Amino acid sequence: MIVDHDVHVHTVLSECNNDPGATAANLVARAAAAGLATLGFSDHLWDSAIEGASDWYRPQNVEHVLQTRRLLPADTRGVRVLVGCETEYCGGGKAGLSRAAAERFDFVLLPFTHFHMQGFVAPADLDTPRAVAYLMAERCREAVATGLATGLAHPFYPFGYSDYADEVLACLSDGELLDCFGLVARAGLSVEINVCMFPGATGQTRPGFHDETFLRVLALAAEAGCRFHFGSDAHAVSQMNAVRGLGSYASKVGIGPADILPLFRPGGARQAPGQAAPAQRG
């Protein structure tokens, strides 16, 4: 499986970016040097038309994120560049993006597990692996139902609890994950294969978090009929390097080129929820 795209990349427009050199131009240059055919920018966003933004999200509105379009270099060195966003899902049907604003982007990534944002995305008393796991499953179903997403960002990665990822994901049965991913597949959304899911992709050793945890998640997503995209979730130019290594993880669970969903197209064209999804495997 050759990875020829990275559609989860943050520029300096994201408040959590930690590299002043992560400009659109520098990131395009890195993508070209890495041999990527497509680069998708997905800065964090909360639409000003939606009430309830946190203080951190409030400055990162639609016009702020769309600045990327005018900051792109004239010569993209053969790389197709798309301008999307990563908005937020807080539960109870509340997302940080209006339908009208969603149409202004080439794609929309929707996370549902930013549980490090306690009191905003996650309840402050979320304190056991089982509670984290069940909330992730509930939020997955709800996020799909919003109809806003093109793809789901780092699905089932428990931000704020990643040191216990093995234990958290073990609380969800294969049947429960298949149920969630079945909804994703039927909605025609893309499942992200993200660097954060695989400690081995960046040479990390984490006692409570092993690559096998998300190999299981991806295998079940594939079994449910989902299709996929790759993302580094880079917040610095150097962090884009790891995305090419994700192909080996995809291959381990039988995900190949035919399983990649080519829904990142200029003009905001997205597969609408309810369109036919690929037939389930096996």
Image: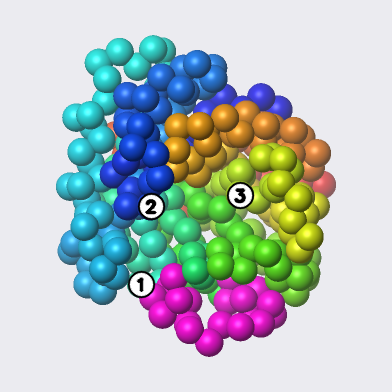
Please say whether residue 197 is one of the residues in the magenta stretch.
no
Q: How far apart in space, not on screen, are marks 3 and 2 (Cα)?
A: 16 Å
Please say whether residue 129 is one of the residues in the magenta stretch.
yes
Residue 104 relative to residue 222: left or right = left
Residue 16, label in figure: 2
Q: How far apart in space, not on screen, are marks 2 and 1 (Cα)?
A: 22 Å
Q: How far apart in space, not on screen, are marks 3 and 1 (Cα)?
A: 25 Å
- Mark 3 vs mark 1: which is more N-terminal? 1
Amino acid type at image mark 3: Cys
Give the image location of residue 109, x and y in percent: 43, 50
Residue 276 visible, this angle: no
Which residue is denoted by mark 3 in the rendering?
196
Which residue is denoted by mark 1 in the rendering?
94
- Mark 2 vs mark 1: which is more N-terminal? 2
Q: Which image quadrant is residue 53 in?
A: bottom left
Asked whether disc 3 touches disc 1, contact meaning CB atoms under 8 Å apart, the reply is no
Residue located 45% across and 76% down the image: 118
Name the main secondary structure of what is drawn in magenta: loop
Residue located 47% across and 59% down the image: 111
